[in-house]
Image (cartoon, grey):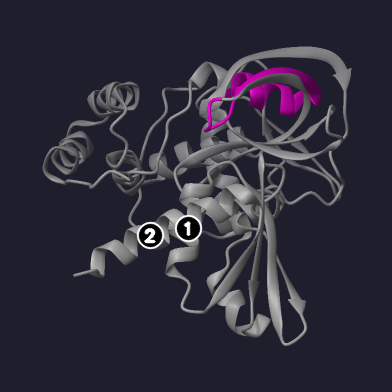
Amino acid sequence: MPTDLSPTARALRTMEILQTRPGTTAGELAASLGVTERAARRYIGILREAGIPVESTRGPYGGYRLGRGTRLPPVVFTEPEALGLVMAALDDADELVGNALSKVIRALPEKVGQQAATLRDHASAAPDPYSVRPDPATTSALVAASAVRRSVRVAYRSESGKESEGEVDPWAVVVRHGRWYLLCRSHRADAIRTYRVDRIGAVHQTTRAFDPPDDLDPVAALEENLGTGWEYLTRVVFDTPLSEVARWVTPPMGRLEASGDGCVLVGSTSTPAMYAQEWLARMPFGFRVEGGPELRAAVAAVAARFTAAVES
């Protein structure tokens, strides 16, 4: 924390800490403020003198918290926080985000607001071509169901246009490389599934409760399952050792297993053409596509196009 803040600024920061972390001890508060415990208690006293009720509890589980019914002042951003917010939103061309950011900038103190506006107006960002913004209402419904651990019925449209509907347990919503995914357990398949949130058309929360796995790591589980459960099976065989091929394989491509002196990549995909053009075409090793027929056809099409490009 900056060392040149006034006592008033530190007192406001103290109130913000207590708002976000009720039960903060004097030691924790001192560490967050960059002061001694004695000074931290002095800022608690300043808040109390200003009429803001701050309750304290003794014991190993004690600490400070704001009293019930406390009316907090408007959110105050520091200069680094305001500029960081603008930078985070710069590469998002969504009109909704842009309008919200403009409102935040207008509400900032003049000096900070001017800097934030200058950064927004004079910095440029190349948009991520793979980034997709899902419907906020759909995303919120999924997050809400995940928070209260209630199953939902979802209508889903795959990339190939196939529509389906079913009940799932929404374990988590994960943002990966600009795309939003629902990590869930499908009741119909009795298996883990990953759905693109922007392809979910409707969400209806049920009364059925669920418990996610105790050791769930949403990001790791998403990575592991992006290559499974899709319409078209894939099986690619390499004569190169697994240790060399593994550096070129990402979890969405499937599971890489040792096989004799080489290895085999087993998984599934909803878009064989993308699998062939973007993933297999960049492999620096020889390989054989043993399955499925859709991926074999997609690889044959890529090979024919490349062959035609060098024919005289």
The question of residue 295 being in magenta is answered with no
Q: Which residue occupies the extreme front position in the image?
A: 312
Disc 2 target residue:
304
- Secondary structure of residue under mark 1: helix
Count of residue discs? 2
Magenta-highlighted residues: 139-161
- Secondary structure of residue under mark 2: helix
Q: Position of residue 89 (x, y in %)?
A: 33, 38
Cβ atoms under marks 1 and 2 closer than 8 Å: yes
Residue 153, image quadrant = top right
The question of residue 158 being in magenta is answered with yes
Q: In this view, does 132 lie above or below 141?
A: below
> Which residue type carries mark 2?
Ala
Disc 1 target residue:
300
In the image shown, does 312 or 65 lie closer to the viewer? 312
Q: Position of residue 304 (x, y in %)?
A: 38, 59
Residue located at (19% from left, 39% from top): 120
Residue located at (17% from left, 46% from top): 124
Rate crowding at label 2 as few (under 14), some (14 to 19) or many (20 or more) other CA atoms within 10 Å: few
